[in-house]
Amino acid sequence: MSQEKTVSEAIHYRRSVRVFDTEKPIDKNIVKKCLEQAALAPNSSNMQLWEFYHITSKDIIDKIAPFCFNQNAAKTAQQLVVFVVRKDLWKKRAKSNLDYMDSVFGKNNPKSAQSSREKVARNYYGKIIPFAYSEFLGIFGFVKYLMVSTIGLFKPMYREVRKSDMRIVAHKTCGLAAQNFMISMAAEGLDTCPMEGSDTWRVKNLLGLPFGSEINMIVSCGIRTEKGVYGERFRIPFEEVYKEV
């Protein structure tokens, strides 16, 4: 395998590969390493509301392919990664952050002994995160929205507090991890294809995922063939999307 690429080289090398070489297996340990790097992606409030299901079983891949509408990228994949949003784990993740603070600052510090940084951090995960993520049939989210909208008349406020807003936040976070993964794979000379088109309910059922989970995307993995990249890369002229203010 060629020498690992720089970030810029990996970004330019990465393409959405639709056909993989079925005769060339890839090392699952390299894919796992790239997933470890995916977990280093920036994410909202360091809540890490994601899980990565690394599918190496050919039998499972064959079962998932029809749920991806038999896209070539799924049928020829050597491995798959299912990026899963776990917004339902927000309490557990908030506690993990608080536990980490115990290891950094010490456990059961009285407020009088806490630094300003510790007070802010503990308040954030102990009060603000529960306020943002708590929900009851959409009702509390609407109440929160009215509250922040009213306060927002007088000062800048974070306004994305409804259930649908927090769902978007969790999916954005998971998407950042998926991008980290694909760039990491490209740096290793391996190829990927993020697949939006899939029957996520059937995939969830096959993998035994809990009701509260949501599939962000399925990424197929392998080594490209000559037919795997459908033509030259096309992008809208940069001048149309770049706005300097």
Image (cartoon, helix red, strand yellow):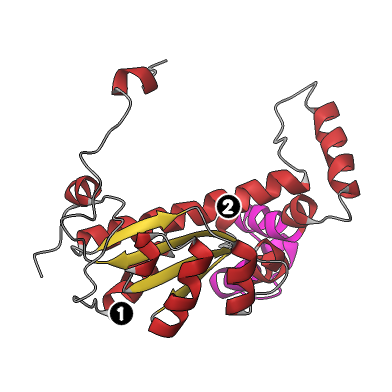
User: As drawn, which residue projects farthest toward the top?
Assistant: 245
User: As drawn, which residue projects farthest toward the left?
Assistant: 2
Checking the image for residue 171, the label placed there is 2
Checking the image for residue 28, the label placed there is 1
Determine whether label 1 and label 2 are within 8 Å by CB. no
Q: Is residue 4 left or right of residue 163?
A: left
Which sits in the foreground, 10 or 111? 10
Q: In the image, is residue 216 part of the stretch drawn in magenta? A: no
Q: Quadrant of the N terminus?
A: bottom left
Task: Give the Cα distance between marks 1 and 2.
Answer: 25 Å
Residue in view at x 59 percent, y 78 percent: 206
Q: Which amino acid type is shown beneath numbered disc 1?
A: Lys
Would residue 159 be visible to someone looking at this image?
yes
Which sits in the foreground, 101 or 77? 77
Kind of element beneath mark 1: helix
Q: Is residue 204 left or right of residue 11?
A: right
- State which region is magenta: 97-126
**Main SS category, magenta section:** helix
